[in-house]
Image (spheres, rainbow, N blue to C red):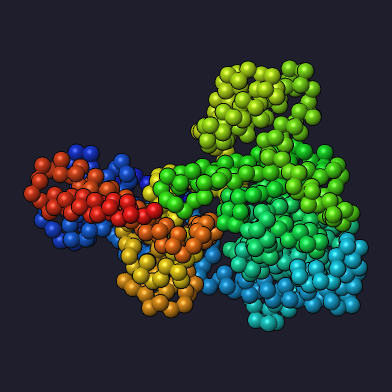
Amino acid sequence: MTQIDDIKSRVDIVELVASYVNLQRSGNSYKANCPFHQERTPSFYVFADRQSWRCFGACAEGGDALSFVMKAERLDFREALHRLGARVGVVIEDRNTSGVGDQLYQINDAARRYFQRLLDEPEGKFVRDYLADRGLNDQTIQMFELGYSPPRDNRLLAHLTEVGHTRELVAQAGLARETDDGRYYDLFRGRLIIPIRDWSGRVAGFGSRALNADAVAKYLNTPRTPVFDKSRILYAMHLAKEPVRQKGVVVVEGYMDAIMAHQHGFDNVVASMGTAVTEQQVALVRRLTTHVTMALDGDPAGRNATLRSLESSWGVFQQRNARASQAGAVSVLQRSEAMEMLVAELPSGQDPDDFIRATPQEWPAFVAGASPLFEYLLASLSARADLNNADDKAWVAQTMLRFVAQVPDAIRRDLYLDELSVRLRVNSETLRSAMRTVGRSPGRRAGGETPPATADAATPAPSRTEDVAEEYCLAMLLQHWDELGPEAAIAVSADWFERSEHREIYRSILRARSGGENGSDGGEMAEILVAPEVESHLNLLRARELMLASTSRLEQAWKQIRLGIEKEFLNKEISQLLTVLQDEADWESPAARQVQAGKERVREINQELAGVT
């Protein structure tokens, strides 16, 4: 889980609020005089079951533990998060701070220009010869901005500091390292340099290949920085967006594989940079296509590692499909078709770079011949086993069941089990019984969901319907502000968002339009600044797919999602008020009138929703 969710899971809101005010038990809730305004009769309630609080008096506000600390201590989101983290013993990583990200992008771009210039100079001739031997032409070298890092004398560091960047920031960008005695040195030395641009086309980091046979590391990437995390980037996606939208995406492992593909006109190819596909990468792809083909090296020695990578990637796809299914019950925003992962394996000993250089005319047929992952794995594993041998057959079955157990849809799970039963000649009920054991095995979550491959993939699936609706509302504001207009955001209230993270993002969107929380001047969208701990979630919302075919579809979807979250908010508030009224037996109170007003508004919303086609 994310650090925010980790902190929330450790906080007992009743205990938290009780450290500020004297709470009294009131049925299933707790009450007190509101700490935020003067009153004689308690109107402030804490609901342990939902880990939330609400003032039904003059404040008319509520929220979760984070929003309570923000209001009680007059802190911003990040300060409150750190305060809560300290309370429950969670140390929050010191991530990017405002303004630093822009500086790191500037440093990376300055380094990119420096590396490119050196490649064109006489000392870079042997690198140009190496690239020519690899089959790359000048146009491709320029398109992918390839460069050369000098082998000694810390020349990049000297250049960057000479043009005004501090050594500390150069190190924070991952281009230099600091020794124990406080000296700095270039990270990339004597290497072919491959700039890595993110979804927005900014130089976020670098990949590199050693040109000296004695180098300790053949390949070396920028380490994780505030702006570079390879689990969140697909190499060459900034060039491939439109081709991917039209033709689907082909995912290869290495930089050179993607570069060679583009040189031969296969411009829908991107690289995962040697890692299993992560949730963040799938979120980017899902915005463009549901058709994903993994092009695997024909490497028999690496098959076990490939199997682990495919299992992790499959798990991410299943989590994404589970989210899409959950969202489909709420709004019209999600396309009905699931993402399917196809696999194409190259001949033994070849990678895409080799294959395309040798036989580029065969690449389209190779991709078109890809098989669904389940079929590919079953065929591949069966070819490696003797299915007349009980131990081999059990190994194939157990391996396949690990994949089937991750499928969220019960019908699709049954179809896979039936196919497995026929192919392995094993009773289907035996397989179902064995899968229940697989689902309970260590390292696997209840319901067959696979833990993320990396900590960076650990953004949890929303656990409640309203979380999904809130995310779609924010995603629409982020991606379609110009079409919706400033009135759209003003028509939404921050109170409607249950999660403090979502309130933080919503308020930041409004601030970015320079109109504050009460309006907008309709100007150009400024940079959306949020707490660093929320940036990954903000990026996921920016990348969330909202397949809307027309302006009218957008307007319908927006109306449905806006009314939906208002209705959810009102229903929750009515439920809380009814709990309070049952405990207090005061049906003539302002709370009772709020219930009636809330019910009337819900009826109006239902009528409006009925008119949305």
Say which quarter of the image contains residue 608. Answer: bottom left
The residue positioned 78% from the left and 43% from the top of the image is 345
Q: Quadrant of residue 227?
A: bottom right
**Relative to residue 598, is residue 253 drawn left or right?**
right
Q: Residue furthest bottom?
A: 163
Q: Position of residue 356 (x, y in %)?
A: 84, 55
* Residue 361 in view in this figure: yes
Q: What residue is shown at x 79% (from left), y 41% (from top)?
A: 302
Which is nearer the eye, 499 or 380? 380
Q: Please report the residue visible at 70 percent of the width from the left and 22 percent of the height from the top.
A: 424
Apparent side of residue 171 relative to residue 256 in the rendered image (left or right) = left
x then y, percent, for residue 33: 17, 53
Q: Is residue 32 visible?
A: no
* x 20%, y 42%: residue: 579
Q: Residue furthest left?
A: 588
* Residue 72 image position (x, y, % from top left): 29, 60
